[in-house]
Amino acid sequence: MSVLSPTITVRRLTIDDYEDYLGLLHELTGGVPLARGEEGRAHFAKLLDHDGTMVFGLEIYDQIVSCATLHILPNMTYGGRPYCLVENVVTLQAYRGRGFGRMVMDTLRNEAWQANAYKIMLLTGKDRGAKGFYESLGYKADQKHGMVLRQVPPYKAPAT
């Protein structure tokens, strides 16, 4: 009896991947409200259509189990070379430790370098335990200080 290995593919996500992507974000955010339903699908479509933005996912057994978003941003320094921002990196808990996150991040890195970006930036939460993962990919925490200004809940203009 032979056992077939599953097909593993890292690819750009499409609108058809919405449900899997939503599940990944739910696992990533741990309860932070997400846009769902038709509104969520519209936000996802807008993200996918945004110039310079790509969402990559790893598919195995017809399911997206790991993903990350790459934003390639125009720039004036470094001879006008772009820089990149990585967001929403997550692998489903049941699939962690198998190199799937690394495969997605390698794909993002290759895409960034192909776009002639001079750097890739990301932030990770201090309590998420992912710092070692990013360091194993070559990211350094000693070169910049990451700072965040959040507006939660979202600003709503006063009624007039």
Image (cartoon, grey):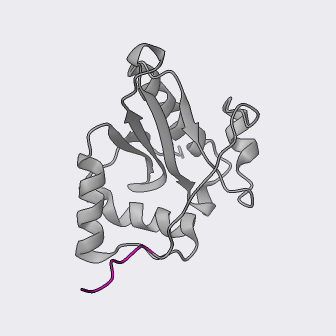
Please state which of residues 107 and 76 is positioned toward the viewer in this rendering. 76
On screen, residue 35 above or below 114: below
Q: Is residue 157 on the magenta stretch?
A: yes
Residue drawn at x 67%, y 33% as measured from the top left: 139
Magenta stretch in the rendered image? 154-160
Q: x, y percentage for residue 72?
A: 39, 34
**Residue found at the far bottom of this picture:** 159
| Secondary structure that dominates the magenta span | loop
On screen, residue 39 above or below 67: below
Residue drawn at x 67%, y 56% as measured from the top left: 125
**Residue found at the far front of this picture:** 160
Residue drawn at x 47%, y 46% as measured from the top left: 6
Q: Is residue 96 visible?
A: yes
Residue drawn at x 28%, y 86% as measured from the top left: 159
Left or right of 158? Residue 128 is right
Q: x, y percentage for residue 65?
A: 49, 55
Please state which of residues 15 and 3 is positioned toward the viewer in this rendering. 15
Residue 149 placement: quadrant: bottom right
**Residue found at the far top of this picture:** 79
On screen, residue 87 above or below 39: above
Residue 142 placement: quadrant: top right
